[in-house]
Amino acid sequence: MAAVAEGLEPEAAATEDAAQDAVDAADAVDAEPGDPPLLVGSRLSLDLYPGGCQRLLHLCARRSPQLLEVQFMQLSSHEDPRLLETTLAQVPCSLRHLRSLVLRGGQQRDVLGACLRGSLTTLPAGLSGLTHLAHLDLSFNSLETLPGCIPQMRGLSTLLLSHNRLSELPEALGALPTLTFLYATHNCLRTLPKALGALSTLQCLDLSQNLLDTLPPEIGGLSSLTELNLASNRLQSLPASLGTPMIPEMPRLFLNSDLDSFLVTPQGCSVTLACGVRLQFPAGATATPVSIRYRLRLPEPRLVPLGPHDSLLSHVLELQPHGVAFQQEVGLWLLFVPPRARRCREVVVRTLTDDNWSDLETHLEEETPKRLWAHCQVPHFSWFLVVSRPVSDACLVPPEGTLLYSSGHPGVKVTFPPGATDEPRQVYMQVVRVASGELRALLEEPGAAASPLLCLSQSGPPSFLRPVTVQLPLPPGVTGLSLDRSCLHLLYRTPPEATWDDITTQVTLELTHLYARFRVTHFSWYWLWYTAKTRVEGLARKAWERLRLHRVSLIALQRRRDPEQVLLQCLPLSKVDATLRRLLERYRGPEPSDTVEMFEGEKFFAAFEKGIDVDADRPDCVQGRVCFVFYSHLKNVKEVYVTTTLDRQAQAVRGQVSFYRGAVPEDVPEEAEAARHRKGTDSPWMATLPIKLPRLRGSKAPGQGQGTSLSLAPLNLGDAETGFLTQSNLLNVAGRLGPDWPAVALHLGMPYRELQRIRHEFRDDLDGQIRHMLFSWAERQAGQPGAVGRLVQALEQSDRLDVAEEVRAVLELGRQKYEDSIQRTGLAPPDPSASPSPESAQA
């Protein structure tokens, strides 16, 4: 962030700096014994201890000449409001040369550790007489309207209003001729004044964490704007005026994932999305303004093409319009959590181009040790994801021949003789390490060993004109001087077959002390084994699969205060203990399952049995089975609500959840039949964990249940094109909120007085309180855009991510059904940027 107002930082002189200056100074004024000095040079620090207002009044009453030299003052707003107002009224007379005034709250915290707001609700009109004031910090206070004296501070350069209760900004704010930095984050702003566009000197505008659903077109008049933060609002689009020539360079935008489009002009811009994506459009990337749309998708197998030893590190980012070529490459940054094992592996961004998936040249930039940015340049938009793969080496083979080494395994190399190709072709090499201990355990043979696994591929014709020499290191512990050649096997695999062939007798193996060399005319997978067993093809297939398997456990936990809420998760063994320690404060349940082995990208599903079923129509639920796709570096977690048709008033229901491999079969077997299938060697069953729904206590009598104390008018929230919630969906949401409903209501913007009224009107009826709150709010949103987005945001802010995720899934399903119906009825032409077929995605 740039400096402001003659060297001051945007958040004013920091408290710790003031304290350090005070401790080092010798000219203390009126400090109590043991307290740091109040006045140090031109800085007056009154926020370091209680009683700052009394001390300032004491200094003003003495008319100390040193007050005329004060340029920077900090005063805590955690004071009696009347005393604070009286004290501030003395400032214009006594501190005439004040340049920075900090009246922040937030120094005190509640029992949960959250910062408390200060008591400041307004400012004395006389503060407009501070003609030298350039920096004003009113953060963490209780302002509901902007004090009238602020627009009269003509020299103001920085205004900090974050963490207040402002619902609007006055038109008079546009009269500040030198305002450069304006921060109004975490307020309740619903609209912006048109006069805001008159702030021609404004460089940084931060309006994140508000309730804005539109921006005035006049915002395009901010000709000096370089940074605009609009994250966590209710915006669905940006005004086209942001890309007009009045702004010589598009500002750096900070947006949230609810805003699904923005405009890029020939001036270019930098955009940061809250979902962990950054985009840099250089000047001239587009010849005309282009509306960019984006969506962060959950990984689907058809949109996640993975090689045998690849791992997915991110969700799938879709950028539209697809296929539109930019005149200059666009910079793309994707945030991801790096894998633990990084030896001989690399991270790349994978994208779809002309129905083929390819890897882009990727550079890593560290945000924190546990969060990295994958940066690449893209010529056009499509689908993008971050993948971890074995290190890939490549070279362009000319007709004159060349040599290709493995950067991770120097002993692996390929020699291309002259004439191997008549035109240049690209060649790729990947090497996968093999753990000797695991291999010996698989073979049950102490002396068994294998070389690294080598994959060779190329562009162009499938075969070379002349044989190419491949060198592999001998298996560990084996040397060319002592080996038994009858135990040495060269294995070969050609995709897509999963079999390995022993080609030792079909090639000539040249052995040195450390290496084996052989010649081939086309490329595939190669593996050198040393074992006394004569038939190793089947063992090689098992070892190949073992290299690709992840050892995992399955868990099923129930929320302590709501046992019908069940969390299902598939975890790598290394993450089980840490995850359980984090979850067991809110959840309880059985121990994790026994170890299960799964492939990256493998499908599986959870089935509730013995009287328990899923209590919602979820898009990831097929015939009562919750579907998963396992990715080793993603969360693989679902939270569902369960129900039962059994009589819980008589006794508790003891059921179970079972996990099965594969997609849900067309004919779902009965429980007894499924139990019989578990006994087979190739059983799809993986694990079963107990689930207990406790006996209902204190239930309402018939006629006093859901809906009797509240008449619900039929309504839908949202629209079909962007996704909507039906009345049934809203009832499901209401049934899951429980005691968290007041927090959700406040984040929806509902006044605290209305919460108190609802509590009083529906005394001893928690369900009635929740439904009345949610449906009365929904009725007021009828016809207003972005209502569903506001509900999702309120759920997230209330730490109900489980319900927010379920709402998002319902919305995505609704949008997909709407798009499919439009295509079926022929109301819209086919979308050329539509998702590729599963067959093309596997190309």
Image (cartoon, helix red, strand yellow):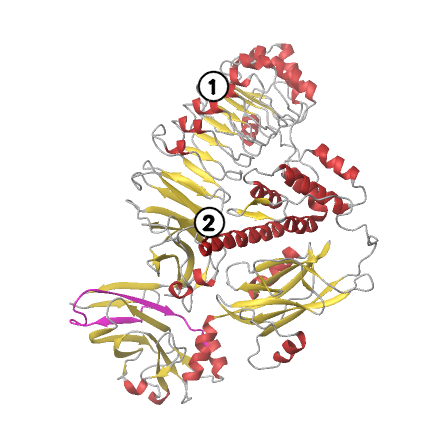
Q: Relative to 437, say whether 331 is above or below.
A: above
Check residue 169 for magenta coloring. Answer: no
Give the extent of the magenta segment: 410-436
At label 2, counting other C-alpha atoms closer than 10 Å, the crowd grade (few under 14, some 14-19, many 20 or more) is: some
Residue highlighted by disc 1:
176
Q: Between marks 2 and 1, how big is the CA–CA gap? A: 39 Å
Residue highlighted by disc 2:
295
**Amino acid type of the residue tagged 1 in the rendering:** Leu
- Of mark 2 and mark 1, the one earlier in the sequence is 1
Q: Relative to 4, say whether 843 is above or below.
A: below
| Residue at left offset 65%, top offset 39% | 777
> Toward the viewer: 838 or 511?
838
Q: Position of residue 373 (x, y in %)?
A: 42, 50
Q: Is residue 769 left or right of residue 457?
A: right
Q: Position of residue 521 (x, y in %)?
A: 24, 77
**Please, what secondary structure does the residue beneath circle 1 have?**
loop
**Amino acid type of the residue tagged 2 in the rendering:** Arg
Check residue 414 for magenta coloring. Answer: yes
> Toward the viewer: 236 or 44?
236
| Residue at left offset 38%, top offset 27% | 223
Residue 784 visible, this orientation: yes
Picture quadrant of residue 761: top right
